[in-house]
Image: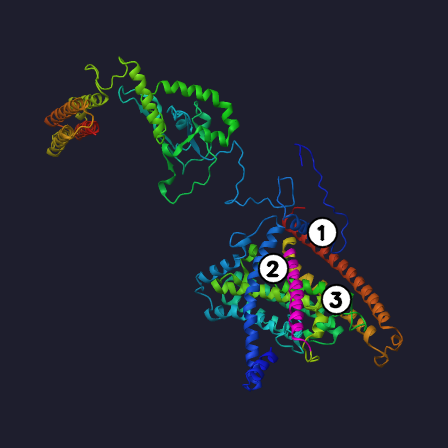
Amino acid sequence: MDIQRGNIIVMDRRRGTLRAGQGLLQGLKVVWDHWVGSFRKNDNFSQIHGTFTIEYPDERMKLPQAYRNMPVLLYDDETGQELCTACYQCARACPPEVIHITQAKDPNTGKMVPASLEFIIEYDACMSCGLCAEACPFDAIKMDHFYELSTDNRMGLMQRKADLNRPVSYYTSIAPDLWDEVKEGAMKKLQGSIKRRPDVIGIAGHLSEKIAARRRQLAAEAAASPPAPVAAAPAAPAGKLSPEEKAAKLAAMRAAKAGGAEPAAEAPAPAAELSPADAKAAKLAAIKAANAAKKAAESPAAEVPAAPLDEKAAKLAAIRAANAAKAAAEAPAAPLDEKAAKLAAIRAANAAKKKSE
Amino acid sequence: MHDVINHLINTVFGLGWPGWAISLIAYLLIATILFMIVPFQMLFLTYFERRAIARMQDRVGPNRVGPEGIFQPVADGVKMFTKEDIVPDAADKWVHLIGPGIVVAPTMFMFAVLPWGPGMVPFDMNIGLLFFFAISSVSAVGLMASGWASNNKFALLGAMRAVAQMVSYEIPAVLSLLAIVLVTGSLSIVDLITFQSGLFISSSDVPGIPDFGLGWFVFTPVGFLAFIAFFIAALAEGERTPFDIPEADSEIVAGYMTEYSGMKFGLFYLAQYVLNFLLCAITAIIFFGGWQGPGVGWLYAQAITPANPAGNGLFNVLAGVLGVFYFLAKTYFFFFVMVWVRGAYARLRIDQLMDFGWKLLIPLTLVNVVSAAIWVGLTKWGAADGLAFVEGWAPLMRWAVAFVITLVMNLVAYFFLVRVYSQSQDERARLDDEVLERLTNVA
């Protein structure tokens, strides 16, 4: 039945003047018609006699293409490259703020790369509004049709990137028309991002053969052009500092600064005398940092060419941190300084550890 | 059964047991068989009802447990058995405990006089019909006891409603049966069934009518009106929609069953469905000939009966099978009608229920009793009873005259009473509106 907006439909309920008891019989007739009709299945909702039941676990309703349940991430079928560039538009658009992204970094240069390192969506708090998919300029995040998400594990609905990745072919199977609309632009943008992705960053993690293929391809490219000035991974120029070194330096600087600025900082503080506990803590931190650096140096470094560099950097950081801590301890230190020194020492130790690993 | 046991023990084995032992064994066997059949009937009826009502509401109904959900009632039973039995602290523990038993027991007693097929009646009582209805009203005591003992306002309300409804609807039910008893002149249920042989005209009314087992009372004006009135009363007695007021779940939770859980609740359910089965069965027996149907009478005539000891035992089985088939087919048809009515009508209000029972059904059945008396006078009486003028008429003529007169009487009574009733209802609605206006100042 096609009902136009604003039209008045007069239903013929076959209700003439009722004689005694006739209304009851008419009621029975209606129910009988439904009973007889119910052995047939209805095709659409304009039919009023017959069952509509879709016996759910056995059969499923055909969902409309624009149906949206939970967001997923797309990756290209051929190359395995994810469409996501970690631009944070979805995270900004998300009303319940359940999208968390870490952008990937080039390990050599430390620069941000248009790819996500980790991508987390908390499905349990997601409200399926689809704003993330609307906001995504790269068509990398799309609303999935899958709705059987129940889990017996509290963290079962925290979806990491590995759980969210879906091939584009999957999305075309559930929403072909919607994908056709955006396909061209999305793939073009993807090609652009691939160019800016070094090594195998941006390839879906579970596609090991795709990663291997990309590695081979990169190796072949490198072999084809031996004097590759860009690929400076093994021998970093002396002038340039590695990110870890940078971080260590920064930490040391911060620690020194904290130590230096301490008299100014403590001026408003009423208790200006040095407490032995603070000094002890600062010393302890310095020792810890030194130990970590030593350990890092002792550990059988896996990357032979990088090892000396790391060791050096870590040692340097530790020494600097220790110095800073010492300086802080020697000066009449307020709890604030002590904290800063500790932080710096911990940072330096972490950096060293990471490098050694 | 008695004869079979007697034959087996005393003739085949030659043990020479006394008559009382044979009778005891025979009745114990019958009771055992019945008590095994009854819960299965109940299980099947619940499944049947759920499936049928689902179809009427354009749904599918339970279809997951077993093929097409046939084991759903078994699953429900397991659930009932494993549920915790909760007795409220403030309840009268003992009455609360025996309440469901008092409700179930009468329904089991009623099977004692229920004929399943030709010669297949547990006990042919000469006051079977009276026994049946007298026993059925005992369950009202159980309902009241359990409702009161629960110490719950909903349970008490439900019990009060149940008793009020049962008491007021026994009257039209028994009055409509009284008309039939007038016609047959017997209270024995077996006699009622044998009376209904023939073809649209009972062969007891008009001798010489071929016996197709279709001389049902429902084909006479007296029987038809009695059937309608009785079936409505049966709906009320069985607490079926539209008369399920005692357990109206949207008003008073579950009525007298509110404070029951587990198997005690299951017993109420059992009692209710068994009572419904029995009411459908008695409707089929009294108005639709019970096991009477084409072929049963002829088959039974060849069988071993007290009247025909030289018969063939095979025909006993054949007549029994066919008779039970007819009987159960009719019974299930009436149960389907109950489900159908449940699917179609809304629940009545308690005052509407009382109005309908007392102001329409009882006058109607009273008129029907008079009609039945006229029917008996015209078809059976003669000069000795003071009706000399019908002596000369042929039996068919007498039957036809009785048919027309009772039909006219019943129709006139029906339309007159319905008009009076609907006027009174309109008046009542108008008064209600007036009161509402006065109270709310909104026209």
> Are callouts 1 and 3 both on one chain?
no
Q: Position of residue A240 (x, y in %)?
A: 21, 16
Residue kind at label 2, given as amino acid type: Asp
Which label is found at residue B214? 3
Mark 1 burial class by Cα count in 10 Å: few <14, some 14-19, many 20+: some
Q: Position of residue A335 (x, y in %)?
A: 17, 31
Nearest to N terminus: mark 3 or mark 2: 3
Q: Which quadrant of the structure image shows residue B426?
A: bottom right
- Chain letter of mark 2 equals B
Mark 2 burial class by Cα count in 10 Å: few <14, some 14-19, many 20+: many
- Chain letter of mark 1 equals A
Left or right relative to B314: residue A183: left
When the figure is inspected, residue A17 is found, relative to residue A107, above or below; the finding is below
Left or right relative to A228: residue B21: right
When the figure is inspected, residue A326 is found, relative to residue A28, above or below; the finding is above
For the N terminus of chain B, the image quarter is bottom right
Q: Position of residue B117 (x, y in %)?
A: 65, 70
Q: Secondary structure at mark 2?
A: loop
What separation in Å lies between label 2 and label 1 (alpha carbons)?
A: 21 Å
> Are callouts 3 and 2 both on one chain?
yes
At a point 56% along the width and 54% down the height, the residue shown is B250
What separation in Å lies between label 3 and label 2 (alpha carbons)?
A: 33 Å
The rendered magenta stretch, by its main secondary structure, is classed as helix
Q: Which quadrant of the structure image shows residue A225?
A: top left
The answer to whether residue B367 is seen in the rendering is no
Q: Which residues are magenta?
A: B311-340
Q: Secondary structure at mark 1?
A: helix
When the figure is inspected, residue B175 is found, relative to residue A21, above or below; the finding is below
> Can you identify the residue that label 1 sits on?
A26
At a point 27% along the width and 14% down the height, the residue shown is A226
- Chain letter of mark 3 equals B
Residue kind at label 3, given as amino acid type: Leu
